[in-house]
Amino acid sequence: MTKVTMTVNGKAVSGTVEGRTLLTSFLREDLHLTGTHVGCDTSQCGACVVHVNGKAVKSCTMFAIEADGAEVSTIEGQANEDGSLNAIQAAFQEHHGLQCGFCTPGMVMTAASLLKENPKPTVDEVRNHLEGNLCRCTGYHNIIKAIMAASGQDVSAIAAE
Amino acid sequence: MPKDTGIGAAPKRREDVRFLTGTGQYSDDISLVNQASAVFARSNVANGVIKSIDTTAAAAMPGVLAIFTGEDFVEVGGNPAGWLINSRDGEPMKEPKRPVLAHGKVRHVGDAYAAVIAETVEQAKDAVEAIEADIEELPAVINMKDALAGSNYVHDEIETNQCFDWGWIEDNRAATDEAIKNAHHVTTLDLVNNRLVPNAMEPRCSMANYNAAMNEYTLYTTSQNPHLTRLLISAFVLGIPENKLTVIAPDVGGGFGSKIYHYGEEALVLAAAKKLKRPVKWTSDRTEAFLTDAHGRDHVTTIELAMDKEGNFLAFRTETMANVGAYLSNFSTATPTFLHGTLMAGNYTVPLVYVNVKAVFTNTAPVDAYRGAGRPEATYSIERVIDKAAREIGMDPIELRRKNFVKPDQYPFGSAAGLEYDSGNYDALMDKMEDVADLAGFDARRAASEAKGLLRGRGVNAYIEACGIAPSNLVGILGSRVGLYDASTVRVNATGNISVMVGAHSHGQGHETAFPQIVAELLGVDAASVDIVHGDTSKIPFGMGTYGSRSLAVCGSAIVRATEKIIVKAKKIAAHMLEITDSEVEFNDGVFSAVGTNKTVSFGDVALKAYIPHDFPIDAIEPGLEETAFYDPANFTYPSGAYCCEVEVDPETGKVTVERMTAVDDFGNIVNPMIVTGQVHGGLGQGIGQALLENTVYDETGQLLNASYMDYTMPRADDLPFYAVDHSQGTACTHNPLGVKGCGEAGAIGSPPTVVNAVIDALQSGGNNVTHIDMPVSPLNVWTAIQNA
Amino acid sequence: MYELEIERPTTVADAVSALGGEAQLLGGGQTLIPTLKQRLADPEKLVSLSGIADMQGISASGDTVEIGGGTIHADVAADGTYAALSELASHIGDPAVRNRGTIGGSIANNDPAACYPAAALGSGATIVTNKREIAADDFFQGLFETALAEGEIVTAVKFPMPQQAKYIKFVQPASRFALVGVFVAKFADGVRVAVTGASNDGVYRWSEAEAALSADFSASALEGLTVSSDDMVTDLHGSAEYRAHLVKVMTARAVNAA
């Protein structure tokens, strides 16, 4: 067992993990941050996306030990300080960009990293950037729309209610 | 005008906040003190005799608490089929036992024959590897035609591998044959409705707890209908009394049919929790999900359409083989029969329909209802053969459909497949579709595509479905072993806020937002004061769950009925407070008034009074304000629609891109248009996925070749277009109090033939003599079709 | 996953000395970790390369760009010095995978449908290890097989930069790996064409196309060529004939876009 220390959502945390412990298990089981989900075994669905040192990664495909000393942020740390939804979260609600909610944390985290590096993406750029995030409920329409809206762009031309 | 929170409004979803902040509670997010983990030993052969299972070494491994095999469940019951189907000769279907764990034989890859309970998941996995199972592999039964020819058997006692041979409508068989024989033109099409894996993003998970002091069980599970799960476990599988078993389906990450059913893993964790007196949790990984979740579709069909020389439809005749897999899942026998055959008249006035369905056991995962369930199969067959027929007789495909549509003045319309359509206007839908899809601009778009070296095609479709499942008296006659009503309790608390307990389960449909809109509308209160309670059998009266686009039409109607009872009771209390008779009370917008006076009491005053009944005439008015209603629908509802798809095909690679997708649907009245649109989007995504991308492939030995996202093509964001969705042409359902029809499955029903029709149109426009390609219309399949043309 | 321990050395020398026994190298882990999760491998120890600063980074000198073996795909994608290579990197996996996966890991794994082997072979790159330098032509030796010896670590890859280059990938629709990917690079002394995803023998050079394009760097130069399907992969997503056909189509498209 190895001791790991990291900063998660701005808070210093530590724990003891096996070599094989994945970051996602550490977050879910040791820290009880169950907003990060596991939807596949092959690193494709993206429900587990978190940020490690500011970069989006699949926490199911990274060992907890490799995050030792890192800054980690998860869906639980995304809301504004007063608890209100941040711009991306609010846009997902406003544009009905989620249904069952299971893929949503990964979608929000992936969208956040996209908008950080590309604040005004095109629709095609958004679609391409979501290549590693599967959603089975929405047909993606409203997810794309929500991310475009969160970037401050006009989405009135994108059909929907 | 709708109020901002009543029927017709589009308030934002209240459930979103917890999902967006990572505070939802899905089954695997719940952990109990001292919980142990279950892992299953699963067959890696498709068909085999279990000679022996030696668990000695495994049992001695670190952390192992218990090991179960099929032997431990010999004395308990099996997981039953919910519908009894009789064959054409009157014989009841073959119904082999589906045990908690395989016993005697394993029947598909992934079939569980043992389970290890250990302190940790990894310890349980280690022990599973140490179980010594001697399984003698037998030849696998995979291909349905070979199965029916039968020299190898899935179940030794069923020597044809046939579950049933069903005819609908059997009395019309001879007349249909005759009509086809004598018709001016007959179009025939052989097609496959490809097998799909539902792939809810949340894998299944079940956790059981046992309270020895009270002899009570709690099961947390990923279910679309916890009451049905409780009923099946109690009445058929484990015999736990219903009043000793609580089933909780907390937040559930999508279902699409696959979580309707009771699965053996649920029974196993219950038995293990009792034996160990500890909570026991099992969480599926994705590969297990591919191998064991109920799959969908998998029909092999020949359909014929007979027409006269004007293009009037005379008859549809269909021969289908439907794969049911290795065991009968709960709805598996209803899906290819009454959810398929009864829709085979489509939107048309065709006088004769005959459908023959042979259900076939194979050494594959069970097949059951997946979004649409039988109705996509019906629509696909009808709408593909119509398209082929139009091409053969040289008529525009829209014109041919319009020529045969049921017309608005024909309702109620008795279809040739035995249903009574209550309302609709298919021409209005088609008109609207032509407008929204901008058919007028198609030629210019085709020219632009051709300038890029791409072929452009347009496909259209008209569909009808039967939703709001279902009238109990009718389905009872048809073989259902359960009633398909739903229930709701409306509890007005003393302080005026309201809890509504509902039998429908929400796993993406937004019930927590939409259902309060109904109560708010009827009671004239703010929807924010109304909360929905669902997914817990200890809290809600009863329910048949969420599937078949039924939640709003059936459970929503139960909410209306319960709320109406609340109003009746509240009027009595108000009359008492106003010192008038019940009939002198009027109720409008949340205010009770004495007719002809300015005396009023508010809804809140009445609610408070109901719980402080100091001066009630106790013979006439009971204290409290809580009512329950069970609602059993009088008929199915019949959503319908007209869809259009435009595709570009790269003739060099065979790659198809969906450029435009238009869905115009008649859902009757709409409660929350934002949610309805979202439901259509999701259905379109899955329907386009079926048409272009998804397929489930077993090799001849029964190995599933694409049991992960590395090989099973899930639709991704860059595979799909924006959709144009319209539901302005609604015709109200005539028999439920909300006038609603159901919207959950429409997109998945209407889109697959639309996409394939468009691809064929594109290929034909490029001079390729291709009349059909089986789904998925993948690059490989399109390119191969072009080469073979 | 079976039990294992993880070491995180900070120098190549320490990494080498940590190897031995049943130890295995861990790059970004984007292929290895899913394999371990399925219990398809059972190393006692993983030696993580992600903490070795010397193996990260991109530097250009003259006509050569050198990429540290531990450099993640996202950094290569963002670099742009060798545009065709950066573009290729920008389509590997997905954004989150590109933030972990490394060029050294990809090259060493030599997945027959991976993209980087096509770039290395198509560019005539040199694979630098802790022991030696290996020409790409000698490095890739069939499915998941390379010239790497025990204890040898890909510390960098040196790419000579061509006059024109382009990689075109036709994706396997589920995994998004290459069903067929073709890297075309035009140098002063000739054209190189490397194909991934198609052959039963892994990444290879299409010599007939190289000859034709060296004489005339245009898609029309390919017209007379045929691609045999004899050694092509057949699977759910592509028949051998389809892959053979795509090799030619993708090569032409790469030439047109180079």
Image: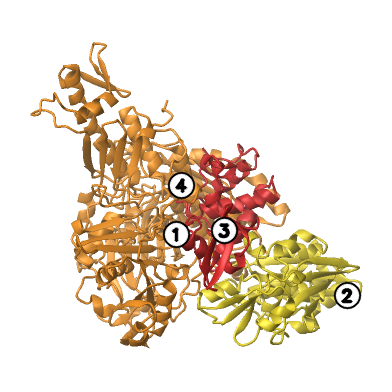
Chain colours: A red, B orange, C yellow
- Of the two numbered discs 4 and 1 on the same chain, state the one appearing first in sequence: 4
Disc 2 target residue: C190
Q: Say yes or no: labels 3 and 4 on the same chain.
A: no
In 3D space, how far apart are the residues under numbered discs 3 and 4 (Cα atoms)?
17 Å
| Amino acid marked by disc 3 | Val
Mark 2 surroundings: few (<14), some (14-19) or many (≥20) residues within 10 A: some
Q: Nearer the viewer, mark 4 or mark 1?
A: 4
Are callouts 4 and 2 both on one chain? no
Residue C176 visible to the viewer: yes
Mark 3 or 2: the one toward you: 3
Residue tagged by mark 4?
Answer: B18
In this picture, residue C173 sits left or right of residue B219: right
The tag on residue B202 is 1
**Residue named by callout 3:** A49
Amino acid carrying label 4: it is Arg
Q: Are marks 4 and 2 in contact (CB under 8 Å)?
A: no
- Measure the alpha-carbon separation of dots 3 and 1: 15 Å
The chain to which mark 2 is attached is C
- The percent coordinates of residue B630 (x first, y second) are 22, 43
What is the C-alpha distance between the residues marked 4 and 2?
60 Å
Q: Residues within 10 Å of mark 1 (few under 14, many from 20)?
A: many
Foreground pick, B638 / B181: B638
Nearest-to-viewer mark from 1 and 2: 1
Element class at badge 3: strand
Q: Are marks 4 and 1 on the same chain?
A: yes
Amino acid type shown at disc 2: Gly
Q: Residue furthest left?
A: B619
Quadrant of the rendering where the C terminus of chain C is positioned: bottom right
